Image (cartoon, coloured by chain):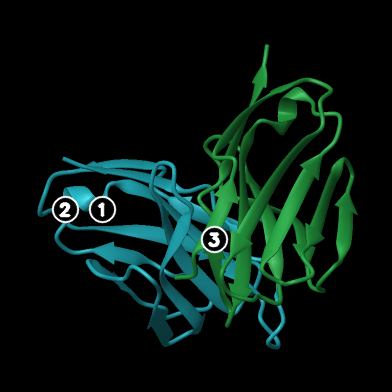
Amino acid sequence: NAGVTQTPKFRILKIGQSMTLQCTQDMNHNYMYWYRQDPGMGLKLIYYSVGAGITDKGEVPNGYNVSRSTTEDFPLRLELAAPSQTSVYFCASSYEASGGYNEQFFGPGTRLTVL
Amino acid sequence: GQQLNQSPQSMFIQEGEDVSMNCTSSSIFNTWLWYKQDPGEGPVLLIALYKAGELTSNGRLTAQFGITRKDSFLNISASIPSDVGIYFCAVHNDYKLSFGAGTTVTVRA
């Protein structure tokens, strides 16, 4: 199993450009998540999905969009990039069967710089 | 999101030392987690705590879930160079995780 994979690893965008960060998992997990990590800060939840066709906002969703057309893929879209979106983005997935905690597995991250 | 206060923010450790870090919250949580992030990688789960007062070990790591359910600490015994990285506490609430700001551990030469 590859686990959670993310592409690209690095990207530089100009202000106002758009891009899609890709995330794929091969563990058949039903839940997927997008986090951003700013320097000296913990991870903050952007969006999450409890299954194909279902997405919901996290703590910091403004400026982002997501879709979940398949179990495996959960892309994150930035429509009008801003310098405040410079960050490291992590995708994660987990198998949730009940209200208890099940481990979230994280991808290696995408480092995005907006100039 | 939930406010988790993690301390210290950073620490330098000597190889062989025991180190400790902790995390507090003003709210009660039923699941506390400790993750480690190596440079250039995503976080990896070290220890999960499910019961107030619980003490759980994973090799040289020991973590405790506070009795009040508002805090947790992580100990690393006999530190080695590969212990460098960022350690995060996190709480699980309604299928979502909230993270502390992290403790950066660096090994002193």
Q: Distance of mark 1 from mark 2, alpha carbons?
A: 6 Å
Task: Relative to A96, say whether B24 is above or below.
Answer: above
Give the residue pinned by disc 2: A82
Q: Distance of mark 3 from mark 2, alpha carbons?
A: 28 Å
For label 1, count other residues whose C-alpha is less than 10 Å away and answer few (under 14), some (14-19) or many (20+). Answer: many
Q: Residue at x 59, y 45 (%)?
A: B7
Query: Is the Cβ of the residue at disc 3 closer than 8 Å to that at disc 2?
Result: no
**Residue type indicated by callout 3:** Leu
B42 lies left or right of A99? left
Q: How many marks?
A: 3
Q: Is residue A3 visible?
A: no
Chain B, which colour? green
User: Which image quadrant: the C terminus of chain A?
Assistant: top left
Task: Relative to A82, say whether B30 is above or below.
Answer: below
For label 3, count other residues whose C-alpha is less than 10 Å away and answer few (under 14), some (14-19) or many (20+). Answer: many
| Chain represented in cyan | A
Give the residue pinned by disc 1: A85
Task: Relative to A64, say whether A38 is above or below.
Answer: above
Q: Residue at x 74, y 53 (%)?
A: B73
Which chain is indicated by disc 2?
A: A
Instruction: Kindly report which numbered mark, 3 or 1, lies closer to the viewer in this rendering.
Output: 3
> Closest to the observer: B70 or A96?
B70
Q: Position of residue A28 (x, y in %)?
A: 64, 74
Q: Is residue A111 visible?
A: yes
Give the residue pinned by disc 3: B4
Q: Residue at x 86, y 29 (%)?
A: B78
Q: Residue at x 44, y 65 (%)?
A: A34
**Residue type indicated by callout 2:** Ala
Instruction: Kindly report which numbered mark, 3 or 2, lies closer to the viewer in this rendering.
Output: 3
